[in-house]
Image: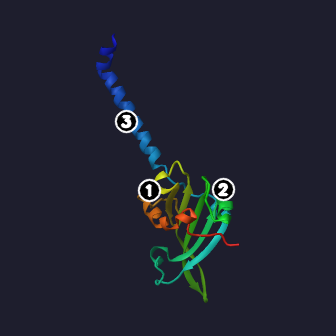
Amino acid sequence: MDLKKILLTTDFRIFVIFLLLISVTLVFAQEKKGVSYPAGYRDWAHIKSMLIFDEKHPLYNPFGGLHHIYVNPKGLTAYRKGGPFPDGTVIAFDLLEAKMDQGAYVEGSRKFIGVMQKDSRKFKETAGWGFDAFEKDTKNSFVMDGGRSCFNCHVGQKEKDYVFSTYRL
């Protein structure tokens, strides 16, 4: 059978369509790979805590509550220097409800865990940072735009490599 006849066969056409579908699926699967849940983040360095307790604060909704910021070992030195952060840095923002108990603010239930992951090749559109958030005590992501809305807020922190929090000595 000559090449022209092979190219015109139904089996060959189905094979080509199959290869195209697999290729497109792999491309979309790679694009969806975003930020991973920060397993073990509570064992990382604790950077700081903060409490937003009043509606007068501009970020009360949706960030009212008790904030704990953690960084993996890869990013700790950069935090101490004030940035820039190397690829592989992961910052976890653990947001908990704040409740009053006998005159003290204490941790309530978890609202979400926000995550920033530095990978300059993977997250080129957002200055090398990937963003995601995981609801309550689950690993269910709820950032729907690939982290672009998170990044838009962080743009004002460009001088600090897009990170709001600073290391406290």
- The residue most toward the right is 169
- The residue most toward the bottom is 103
Return the mark for residue 74: 2
Residue bearing mark 1: 146
Report the side of 59 relative to 74 (left or right).
left
Query: Marks 1 and 3: CB-CB under 8 Å?
Result: no
Mark 2 or mark 1: whose residue is earlier in sequence? 2
Return the mark for residue 2: none
Q: Secondary structure at mark 2?
A: helix
Q: Is residue 50 above or below residue 93?
A: below
* Disc 1 from disc 3: Cα separation: 23 Å
What is the crowding at mark 3: few (fewer than 14 residues within 10 Å), some, or many (at least 20)? few
Identify which amino acid the numbered label 3 is placed on.
Leu
Where the N terminus falls, by quadrant?
A: top left
* Disc 3 from disc 2: Cα separation: 38 Å
Mark 3 or mark 2: whose residue is earlier in sequence? 3
Camera-nearest residue between 7 and 87: 87
Q: Is residue 109 above or below residue 88?
A: below
